[in-house]
Amino acid sequence: MAERILVVDDEPGIRDVLRAYLEQEYFTVRTAADGAAALSEAAGFQPHLVLLDLMLPELDGLEVCRRLRADFPTTYVIMLTVKAAETDKLVGLGLGADDYITKPFSPREVVARVKAVLRRAREQNASPTALTFPGLSIDPLRRQVLRNDAPVGLTAREFDLLLFLARHPDQVFTREQLLDHIWGYTFPGGTRTVDVHLGNLRRKLEDDPGHPRYLQTLRGVGYRFVRDPA
């Protein structure tokens, strides 16, 4: 079954070009010109991935991203933005965007990024064996995380990052290694992207994010998932 992509942009030319390039790669594509239409389309279409313009009329991309995250936590969101400021991009990542591409861009670059994101997702789901740790369980097949038997709502990228670290417990990974393993390419957001996603994970998983049990930082080195936290 072809993976479903929703393209959201208020510029018809961008929507049409991205749709044409994505359909050439056998994706099923729908488009929306504003935030309200995007949310309505997503409800029926159930996209695997959303290409979401940041600067939309009325309901902007950040608010659309926030609502998509609440309703479709396993859907990947790549933001399309003309804003160059790092703070703007980090706000989007903090709201649950998995990636971003700065305009102007090559349609081939966008297609390559979409394919990389979805390929990594398939690779992450290739091994369905559930992982169990003290107070925490991770089910790759259902893409579900339980903390003390209560479900934890993670974004698609947060789940991928946690699953990768949990499959390599007690092993330390640099930010660059995590970018390579999880994002699958040289991500323009740099290593700050990893920090944002790890911070989001800690707020959702740890009793005290300032003193994490599972997701620990080795200063100057990187991150590790602790198999048996004290």
Image: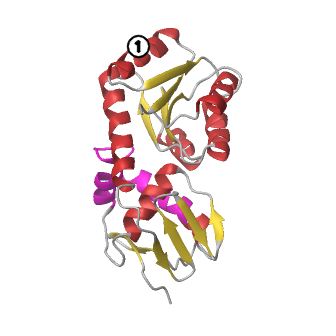
Kindly identify the residue that appears in the image at 28 percent across and 44 percent down. Answer: 185
Kindly identify the residue that appears in the image at 63 percent across and 25 percent down. Answer: 41
Q: How many marks?
A: 1
Kindly identify the residue that appears in the image at 40 percent across and 26 percent down. Answer: 27
Q: Main secondary structure of the magenta part?
A: helix
Residue 208 versus residue 123 in the image, above or below = below
* Residue 219 seen in render: yes
Left or right of 3, for residue 154: right
Residue 225 versus residue 30 in the image, above or below = below
Q: Nearer the viewer, residue 199 or 214?
A: 214
Q: Amino acid at mark 1?
A: Val
Residue 134: horizontal and vertical position, in percent?
Answer: 53, 83
Residue 107: horizontal and vertical position, in percent?
Answer: 34, 21
Kindly identify the residue that appears in the image at 38 percent across and 41 percent down. Answer: 118
Residue 199 versus residue 87 in the image, above or below = below
Q: Which residues are magenta?
A: 175-201
Label 1 sits on residue: 17
Q: Looking at the rendering, which quadrant does residue 3 occupy? A: top left
Q: Looking at the rendering, which quadrant does residue 154 occupy? A: bottom right
Q: Nearer the viewer, residue 148 or 207?
A: 148
